[in-house]
Image (cartoon, helix red, strand yellow):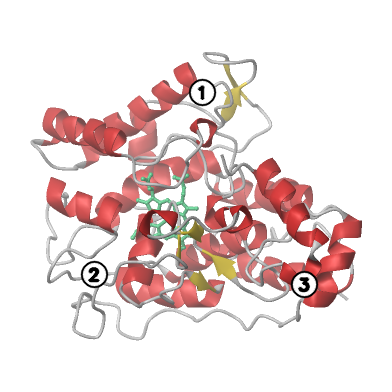
Amino acid sequence: MVSFTNFVTLALALASTASAFPAYGSLAGLPREELDKVLPTLEFKKPAPPPGPLAYNGTKLVYDKAHPWKAPGPNDFRGPCPGLNTLANHGYLPHNGITTPAEIVTAVMEAFNMDNNLAKFAAYVAHLVDGNLLTGLISLGHATPETGPAPPAPALAGGLNTHLVFEGDSSITRADAYWGDNYSFNQTLFDELTSYMDRYGGGRYTWDVAKEAKWQRIQNSIATNPEFSLMQPRHFTVYLEATFVINFFVDGRMTENRSLGKEEALSWFKTNRFPDDWYRPGAPTAFENITDVAKAHVIEPGRNVNGVNTYEVDPTQPDLYNFCGIYVDFVNRVVPMMYPNPTGDILEALQINLQYLYDSAAEACPGQQQFPYGKPQ
Ligand code: HEM
């Protein structure tokens, strides 16, 4: 399992040979004395601001000649996000899967027409907890042992695989981290999904399938995963990813009753490949229909507090209709958990990345910028 604790253990092993600490490795959670060993080996690169919205934001062919599909090799990093894995396989992101939040923003806008603010919000949430704040690099997950010899253990950890800070439970086609592998395509889960497509969507992924399949995954996790958690930002992203399947994976030329077939779904989730002749959505898109999906079967943020079937709502957590609350909770609770007492370059890097994150939320949360480390000087 690539839990946050395991990641710290592996990072500590690396830190003892500080020169080997990877430039994409997250510094989150490293104790002060380890940071002191690692920091001198890394060069601080002040992150440039991410790009603004697209100039042309209509639909267009995305699987074009300039972006052929190429499978990842043994040293390429892939992880739990089929959207980003696909972009790396087609060269919209670096093929090795080691990238920057600004590159992610550019790529998800260009290839998926993701709304600029959502693209920035997702990329900087991920980078703050899963990326290397000094070098500005983030990995999509782990080097891909399925396609080659297993890499040394530390290379398996970290990046977007890291459990509980962004990656979470009740995913569509990935198992809960409790079961050991939270990033690989899982055929059993995909088969369950297609049975829901048959039952509720006439063989396709529709909004009804999004509602019912996601609810089934949550119920299953409550009943089988003693460590199940829907603490934010997971309560938000668990529904967000269910909407992504229609909002982003469906060809942009399908404008009415958008839905996804089984073969295309397999291409996205398993092969991480654009369906042939694929066009991006026809307008910038964010989290359309997320409240409909979540309201179909209501569960508030919380977790199994004492083994399976002990789900308790946490009344201090914002729910998913409160986007600003999710921003505030992430910045004031999650980030300081990872970086309790930052100083020097790390503090500066945190302040810059926190600013980029707020920029993405400012329209929705005017006047609510949070400064967990005080206002920058
Ligand atoms: C903008 C930056 C993005 C970041 C940082 C990101 C990150 C992630 C992460 C960490 C997960 C794992 C969550 C889990 O535990 O299930 C995930 C899942 C997912 N992402 Fe992304 N993602 C991004 C953009 C996208 C885009 C553009 C798409 C669609 C085109 C997408 C589609 C999905 C889907 C469908 C899942 C669920 C996979 C499954 O449950 O099987 N993501 N993403």
Q: Which amino acid is tagged 2?
A: Arg
Q: Which mark is residue 280?
A: 2
What residue does disc 1 label?
Answer: 225
Q: Nearer the viewer, residue 266 or 238?
A: 266
Question: Which callout, 1 or 2, points to the residue nearer the camera?
Answer: 1
Q: Residue at x 43, y 64 (%)?
A: 74
Eyeballing the image, is 187 above or below 227? below
Question: Which callout, 1 or 3, points to the residue nearer the camera?
Answer: 3
Instruction: Say how many tags the image has.
Output: 3
Q: Residue at x 55, y 49 (%)?
A: 323
What residue does disc 3 label?
Answer: 19
Residue 313: % across, % down: 59, 23
Q: Nearer the viewer, residue 269 or 150?
A: 150
Left or right, 127 with respect to 193, comes to right
Residue 285: % across, % down: 34, 63
Eyeballing the image, is 124 above or below 61? above
Q: Which amino acid is tagged 3?
A: Ser
Q: Quadrant of residue 365?
A: bottom right
Mark 1 / mark 2, whichever is N-terminal: 1
Mark 3 / mark 2, whichever is N-terminal: 3
Quadrant of the image for the C terminus? bottom right
- Spatial CA distance of label 1 from label 2 is 36 Å
Residue 256: % across, % down: 11, 55
Identify the element where label 2 is drawn.
loop
Q: Which amino acid is tagged 1?
A: Asn
- Spatial CA distance of label 1 from label 3 is 38 Å
Identify the element where label 1 is drawn.
loop
Residue 162: % across, % down: 59, 49
Q: Quadrant of residue 369?
A: bottom right
Write down which quadrant ligand 1 falls in: bottom left
